[in-house]
Image: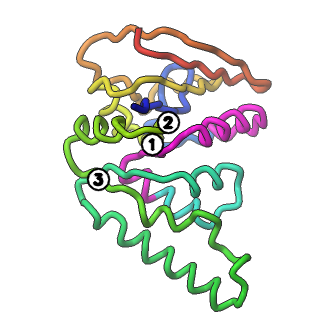
Amino acid sequence: MRELILGMSVSLDGFVSGPDGDAKWIFSGDQEAIAWKVENAWNASLHIMGSRSFQHMASFFPTSTGVFSPPMNQIPKAVFSKQGPAVLKAVAATINELRDTRVQAGDKQTGPLQPGAESWAEAYVASGDLADEITKLKGMEGKPMFAHGGAAFARSLIAQNLVDEYVLLVYPIALGKGVPIFSDLPAPRPLKLVSSRTFPLGSVAQIYRPA
């Protein structure tokens, strides 16, 4: 059995973005916090996300050379979408186009496509009941699954009590209003603080498990 870890960046008052989706404050430039997040990304056997996050990431990571790109490209993905396999069509077309560009350049070792980029077009598509799909994925052996959101997907995982561990990076900013992830709870849910780590620019990693 493998567990499901939900990793999110949140403000002091519990929002993952402003009401208009703005989350520029997440990119604080704190190198220790970034290294910690990359380490967490590598400690997964599967990255899971909702369809909007998947489409956004699939258009970015295959050609990105940033520090998050290797774990995001090289570790298998699952996308939760009612569209079924159709959600992969645009991704596959983009990957094929980039692959052709690299081959035409005559150098299979260089080019815009990063190692593991093809895995985005090979993602597992979970289109059934959320709890059933998560239970099936949890039943496989391996390191934990890491859920990235977006907010609506995270709310659904939380509301149905499917998360085994919450990895929250809390930033030193209060937004006043914004997009929450705990707003769909059917009742208050006690959590147990497992560990806490403060980074140089003021963000705090807080890891919780169900009490």
**On the picture, is 175 further left or further right than 147?**
right
Q: Give the class, few, some or many, for how many residues have Cα within 10 Å of label 1's Cα (few <14, many ≥20).
A: few
Q: Is 193 above or below relative to 77? A: above
Say which residue label 2 marks. Answer: 17
- Disc 3 versus disc 2: distance between alpha carbons? 22 Å
Q: Label 1 vs label 2: CA separation?
A: 8 Å
Name the disc covering residue 20, or none: 1
Which residue shows up at 31% across the image and 10% down it?
Answer: 188
* Label 2 element class: strand
Instruction: Decide whether residue 43 is among the magenta residues.
Output: yes
- Highlighted magenta segment, given as a residue range: 26-55
In the shown orientation, is residue 48 left or right of residue 160? right
179 or 170: nearer the eye?
A: 170
- Image quadrant in which the C terminus is located: top left
Q: Position of residue 7 (x, y in %)?
A: 51, 33
Q: With 135 as the anchor, is 31 left or right in this view?
A: right
